Amino acid sequence: MHSRTANVDGKPHPFKPAIRLPDALRLSTRHLSLLALLATLVAGGFWGEYVSGLLIQGFLFGILAISVDMLWGVTGILTLGASAMFGIGAYAMGICFVHVTRDWWAIPAGLIVGVLVAFLLSLLIGWLAFYSKTKVSEFYITIVTLGMSVLFAQIANYGGRLTGGSSGLSGFTPLPAHNGGWYWLTAAVLAAVGAVASVISRSDFGLVLRAIRDHETRCRYLGIDTPLVKTLMFAGCNAVAAVAGSLYALYSTVVAPSLVDFVLATNTLIWVALGGRGTLFGPAFAAIAINAGSPSLNAAIPFYWQGFLGLIFVVSVVSLPRGFLPAVGDWVSTLVRRRPHATLAPMLGADVAAQMLAVRPDLHVPPLSISRGSDRGMAGTPSHAPHGPSATLELRRVEKWYGSFPALHDVTLSVTRGELVSIVGPNGAGKTSLLRCLSDGVERTAGDVLVSGMSIGTLPPDKIVSLGIARKFQGASVFGELTVRECMMIASWRGRLPSLWRRTSAVTVPPPAASVLRRLRLEDVWQERAANISHGQRQTLELAMVLALEPTFLLLDEPTAGLTEDERAGVGTALRQLVRDHRLSIVLIEHDFEFVKEISTRMVVLHAGQVLIDGSVSEVAASQLVRDVYLGRQARPA
């Protein structure tokens, strides 16, 4: 049997992926860790009070591990502030019970206060870390949350009567529930948090989170407000950590500074790393297992067990970067791959195993459809972008300085609808700096950039995309961990945040993007990871992604770099068709002078950050001044 998928022109063509038995029977890390969690939940209910007490604490730490995994493993935010948020929830509950009231309403009051404080504080930290106008390292949030954990530990230790100092807070009125009730309550909360996290991570919104983790810059240039997404995720996950802390305080009836210190913060990273980043249930199982085994380790090697745990973490990071549980899942899958019948027969029976081995599953590839809306102005142009005949992109006396070095000086030019303007010049002329000034409002040192008379000001890239400007980078800027279909799906949303729980199967792209996909045969690798396709296909994929944004002005930085002659010819033909059929305006940077001569309607020569010549292709090609510049001679007036 062969699976089939629709081509971009609506005609189906056979798609024959290399599907092998191990892929169909592969035991994923999420399934493995979920089975381990279920086994622990069922077995733990029949153990004694001591073991069930350890598991209750482990369940609460498992909730904390899931919240950290959603940040670090799914979204790519490495945080060391989870212990502080856990402690905020615990101390809010303790303060309400010890200093306010011992009545029943202290429970909802403490829970609400803890969650609100954690959420609002996280919003503040997210605003400082993710909305900074200054470009900061991706580890900036890690350093900030590390400082927050240290600060909260000091507050807890030296908070006097409010926090109980180093002795903490005690004397809660315990809930009238035995360990069995707490066991199933915390297990239910852990299951609910894991289920919600799993649904979100597998949804369309989860796909956006993984794209941010993979390539945040590309997300911003696809119109996604990544600071907003990261801030909301940071605040939401920290609020869940505060819930776990509140429940921990209720169960233990003691709140101590150890709940907010650096040790718990690093332990959460160990749980996530060992359980497998992005698997959600793996970190939860690791948290439960380590917490349950800690008393035995502490009794056996009281002064060394924390160091032993740290050593396991280091070995895991170096030797098993995906985590311990993913390695186990890979080992089981390899065993099935090598001896499928011998492995499956004891578990399923010989007849069932033989039937499974005889099945060749089809791969269903969701179709790619093309949008045909007539209410969008000109074909391929969003209604919010300028798309009239007079749509122009203007640079007025634009300058860009790197310290005392002028990369651009007094650059003034304009691009009208339906033009393909090539920016040429020797290395160091300022071509890429020019594209940066067009696509990011904070890049300019002086001057102005206007789209149909409206200044972009200091708008970030995700807001400039909504004005109709899309940029392709010099290197292939795609999401390597996502499939080609998923990359195109994210681009097709044009910055709109998708559903938190649904997963869309179809991909709808505008005609210009479909034209590139069809001409350069990108649909042949529709289900391949972007990291596994060729360099030329990645270049084509990025071009199709930016065209899915339905731009009016397309900025291309060396789109044919590293391509073969046939691939370059295909890109050139596609660009001419975009200008001719869809009236797209293209600003192109390219070193191949012969290539740009064939496709350009106008050429601009940059030299030493200034416009040397702005004219027709024939004028630039015949200019002796241009020849002197490319040969490194002293430029002289024409």
Image (spheres, rainbow, N blue to C red):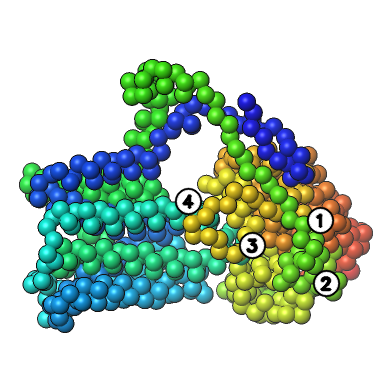
Q: Is residue 12 left or right of residue 476?
A: right
In contact (CB < 8 Å): disc 1 and disc 2 = no
Q: Secondary structure at mark 4?
A: helix
Element assignment for label 1: helix
Q: Secondary structure at mark 3?
A: loop
> Where is residue 445, by image quadrant?
bottom right
Q: Is residue 158 visible?
A: no
Q: Nearer the viewer, mark 1 or mark 2?
A: 2
The image quarter in which residue 330 lies: top left
Label whose residue precedes the other's in the sequence (3 or 4)? 4
Circles 4 and 2 in contact, beta carbons < 8 Å: no
Badge 2, how many Cα within 10 Å: few under 14, some, many 20+? few
If you read the primary sequence from the N terminus, does the residue marked by circle 3 or circle 1 appear first?
3
> Mark 3 to mark 4: distance in Å?
20 Å
| Contact? badges 2 and 3 (CB < 8 Å) | no
Q: Position of residue 115 (x, y in %)?
A: 31, 72
584 relative position to 59: left or right? right
Residue in the image at 23% along x and 49% along y: 288
Q: Which residue is mark 4?
A: 202
Front-lying residue, 256 or 351 = 351
Residue at 68 percent of width and 47 percent of height: 368
Q: Residue at x 28, y 67 (%)?
A: 242
Q: Pick the residue in front: 514 or 243.
A: 243
